[in-house]
Image: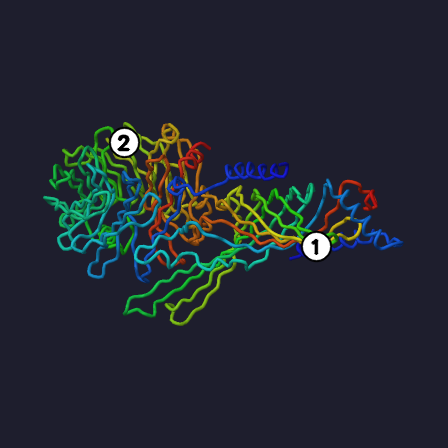
């Protein structure tokens, strides 16, 4: 949470600083000024490199390909203990991105290395019942498993500026490769024990387990989205970017699925799954050509 | 045309990205796994005795189960597939009880001994690799209270107990139930010495590590009660007296596991008043009377008192390795690796966490890995059979430290 606030503050500072560089000019003639600006823009934008910084939040969605479990039932249906309630689009993550883009005739080829922190959670439940004569012997045990994973994302994106002058909406599509940096799992258990003579509800302390090996080192996917740039007046742009990442490969390490004795002890094995993310980012883009140290473009 | 280049670049990168990712691989599913076989009945209580891998890569587990109509435990059999997933189980009727290891493979069938709950006469039971059904054959002759068996030279070597004459018996039994040879050795006189034996059979007391087999020097041996002590007894199956005895300390000391290596060499483990000692390469005399307390051994204070020990001789990466498996005080299954020819310690590995684990059996798998069968306590309270499979690569790492 603190990280997210810091990123937002950073973006706001950059935006305010950039806006402060704008020079107020006298306007001799509105028509001629607008015409000149458009001409300058065309020249300015004909070929341009952009450097940007953005940060924001993301929500995760899990698509399960194949379910795995440490517990193999002998007298009941395995689906009853399958992981349920993948809390999709529920837990916020965060990301910070450096954008390097090349503009050419409304198209941008953009490389956007990103640090991404994601979170998703699932739960599963086990139940044991006594025979008819011992019907009060009933125990329920529920596990909540929270995954926190950090990735380095390397997207390559093509953007197309739809229209506009100061406000320039765009559409974008691309691909990305993700490298897992670290991962943790937090497991908490709660349950009901009716066998102890009453309705005994219990909770266990949350156990945090390093789970880097349980996640695939690399995965990849495609991405698409929309965004809008707002020209602050000196060609420094404020950028709002919305992107949906669609995972194309498994994020679980199939080789190390059962490698954590701690997690096997609580009956957990990671499913084969793909990860989608909805990103919302806010940032700034700076032109690299014709740029003075004062952030004023040379062609103005 | 130039605008197509970025798209082409993206396609090329996509191909590159997809090449270095991890997709589902069925090979990994069977290489290493942990499986716990759960029954949702509150009072279900099965425990494993021994496990064998079948030619299809699956696993057959011989186990016991609590009976309500007998003092003895019933027979439980389970089949898991190559990925460790439950396939089927058989709860054998209580007309046969007290299953014992080893679970032995012979001519496509898997054999174990059990006994009649009323007469205590031994029976030979067999199942096929798919666990289609259980076949029982009565052992013809006076073999009662079987305690442990091994399969040597196409026959069973069985240690049993004759409670009428207070004898520990060792018998050579053919797979069709014929007793080819039998010798009995007195446990001593008095109820005190018999009580722990009876408690072993009805599982109200300590489970003693009975063993029986044939040493490379041609002598048969059993680990059981003889002359008031839990001893390792050698016999040529002809003489009425043992050829040699390694005596224990009444029922407070003796061998917890023995595995013949070559000549008089054995890999063994012993217990003594709760302490545990491993002897990965030790000469045991089959022709004299000695005491196990004189054998020394590596002291393992991390093991539970009088720990159950399993020894497996395996070839790992062309090396002769002895794997000792036992139960630790921290409720894990400890695996200790020793050089099979020198007895030198190589490394260790501990399995299980969070829930308690206890060992029942270890076996080397067809793919060069290791499968450990044991009991864990689901939710900390429900004893359930488990299999922990270690991949060949992990095992080679453990055995080469």
Residue B322 locus on image (x, y percent): 36, 34
Instruction: Establish if B151 lies above or below B46.
Output: above
Q: Secondary structure at mark 2?
A: loop
Question: Between residues B362 and B274, which one lies in front from this camera angle?
Answer: B362
The colour scheme used to paint the residues is rainbow
Question: Between residues B330 and B90, which one lies in front from this camera angle?
Answer: B90
Instruction: Establish if B236 lies above or below B335.
Output: above
On residue B210, the disc is none
Question: Between residues A120 and B233, which one lies in front from this camera angle?
Answer: A120
Q: Which residue is mark 1?
A: A6
Quarter of the figure with residue A299: top right
Q: Which residue is mark 2?
A: B285
User: What chain does badge 2 belong to?
Assistant: B
Residue A280 locus on image (x, y percent): 63, 55
> Which residue lies at the image location 45% right of the left edge and 43% below the top edge?
A254
Answer left or right for A237 relative to B331: right
Question: Between residues B90 and B48, which one lies in front from this camera angle?
Answer: B90
Quadrant including the N terminus of chain B:
top right
Q: Is residue B250 visible?
A: no
Mark 1 and mark 2 on one chain: no
Answer left or right for B386 relative to B16: left
Q: Secondary structure at mark 1?
A: helix
Q: Residues within 10 Å of mark 2 (few under 14, many from 20)?
A: some
Instruction: Establish if A116 lies above or below B20.
Output: below
> Which residue lies at the image location 40% right of the left edge and 58% below the top edge?
B379
């Amino acid at each position: 949470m603190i990280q997210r606030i810091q990123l937002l503050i950073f973006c706001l500072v950059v935006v305010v600083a950039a806006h402060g560089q704008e020079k107020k000019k006298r306007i001799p003639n509105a028509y001629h000024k607008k015409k000149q600006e458009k001409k300058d823009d065309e020249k300015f934008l004909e070929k341009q490199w952009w450097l940007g910084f953005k940060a924001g939040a993301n929500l995760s969605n899990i698509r399960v390909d194949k379910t795995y479990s440490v517990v193999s039932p002998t007298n009941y249906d395995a689906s009853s203990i399958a992981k349920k309630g993948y809390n999709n689009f529920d837990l916020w993550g965060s990301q910070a991105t450096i954008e390097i883009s090349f503009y050419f005739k409304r198209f941008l080829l953009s490389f956007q290395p990103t640090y991404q922190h994601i979170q998703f959670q699932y739960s599963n439940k086990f139940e044991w019942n006594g025979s008819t004569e011992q019907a009060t012997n009933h125990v329920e045990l529920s596990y909540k498993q929270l995954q926190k994973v950090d990735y380095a994302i390397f997207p390559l994106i093509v953007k197309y500026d739809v229209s506009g002058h100061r406000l320039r909406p765009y559409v974008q599509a691309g691909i990305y490769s993700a490298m897992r940096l670290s991962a943790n799992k937090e497991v908490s258990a709660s349950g009901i024990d009716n066998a102890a003579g009453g309705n005994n509800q219990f909770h266990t302390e949350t156990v945090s387990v390093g789970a880097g090996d349980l996640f695939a080192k690399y995965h990849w996917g495609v991405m698409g989205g929309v965004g809008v740039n707002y020209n602050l007046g000196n060609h420094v742009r404020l950028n709002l970017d919305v992107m949906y990442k669609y995972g194309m490969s498994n994020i679980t390490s199939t080789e190390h699925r059962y490698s954590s004795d701690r997690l096997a002890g609580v009956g957990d094995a990671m499913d084969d799954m793909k990860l989608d993310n909805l990103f919302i980012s806010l940032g700034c883009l700076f032109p690299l050509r014709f740029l003075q140290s004062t952030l004023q473009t040379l062609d103005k | 045309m130039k605008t197509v280049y970025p798209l082409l670049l993206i396609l090329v990168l996509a191909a590159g990205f997809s090449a270095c990712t991890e997709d589902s691989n069925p090979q990994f599913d069977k290489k290493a796994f942990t499986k716990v076989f759960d029954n949702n009945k509150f009072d279900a209580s099965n425990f494993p005795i021994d496990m064998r891998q079948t030619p299809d890569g699956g696993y057959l587990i011989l186990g016991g189960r609590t009976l309500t109509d007998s003092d003895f435990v019933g027979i439980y059999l389970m089949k898991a597939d190559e990925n460790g997933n439950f396939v089927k189980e058989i709860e054998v009727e209580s007309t046969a009880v007290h299953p014992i290891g080893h679970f032995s493979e012979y001519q496509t069938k898997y054999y174990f001994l059990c006994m009649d709950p009323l007469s205590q006469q031994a029976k030979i039971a067999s199942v096929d690799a798919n666990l289609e059904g259980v076949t029982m054959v009565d052992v013809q002759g006076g073999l009662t209270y079987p305690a442990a068996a091994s399969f040597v030279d196409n026959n069973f070597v069985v240690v049993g107990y004759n409670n009428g004459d207070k004898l520990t018996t060792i018998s050579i039994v053919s797979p069709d139930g014929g007793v080819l040879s039998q010798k009995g050795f007195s446990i001593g006189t008095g109820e005190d010495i018999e009580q722990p034996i009876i408690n072993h059979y009805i599982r109200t007391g300590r489970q003693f590590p009975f063993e029986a087999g044939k040493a490379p020097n041609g002598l048969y041996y059993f680990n059981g009660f003889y002359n008031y002590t839990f001893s390792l007894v050698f016999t040529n199956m002809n003489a009425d007296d043992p050829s040699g005895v390694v005596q224990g300390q009444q029922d407070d000391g003796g061998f917890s596991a023995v595995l013949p290596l070559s000549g008089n060499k054995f890999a063994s483990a012993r217990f003594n008043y709760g302490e545990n000692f491993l002897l990965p390469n030790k000469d045991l005399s089959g022709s004299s009377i000695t005491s196990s307390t004189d054998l020394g051994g590596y002291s393992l204070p991390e093991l539970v008192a009088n720990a159950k020990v399993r020894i497996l001789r395996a070839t790992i990466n062309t090396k002769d390795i002895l794997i000792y498996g036992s139960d630790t005080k921290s409720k894990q299954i400890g695996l200790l690796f020793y050089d099979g020819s020198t007895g030198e310690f190589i490394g260790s590995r501990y399995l299980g966490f969070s829930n308690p684990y206890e060992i029942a059996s270890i076996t080397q798998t067809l793919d060069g890995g290791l499968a450990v069968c044991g009991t864990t306590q689901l939710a900390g309270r429900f004893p359930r059979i488990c299999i922990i499979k270690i991949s060949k690569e992990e095992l080679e790492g453990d055995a080469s430290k």
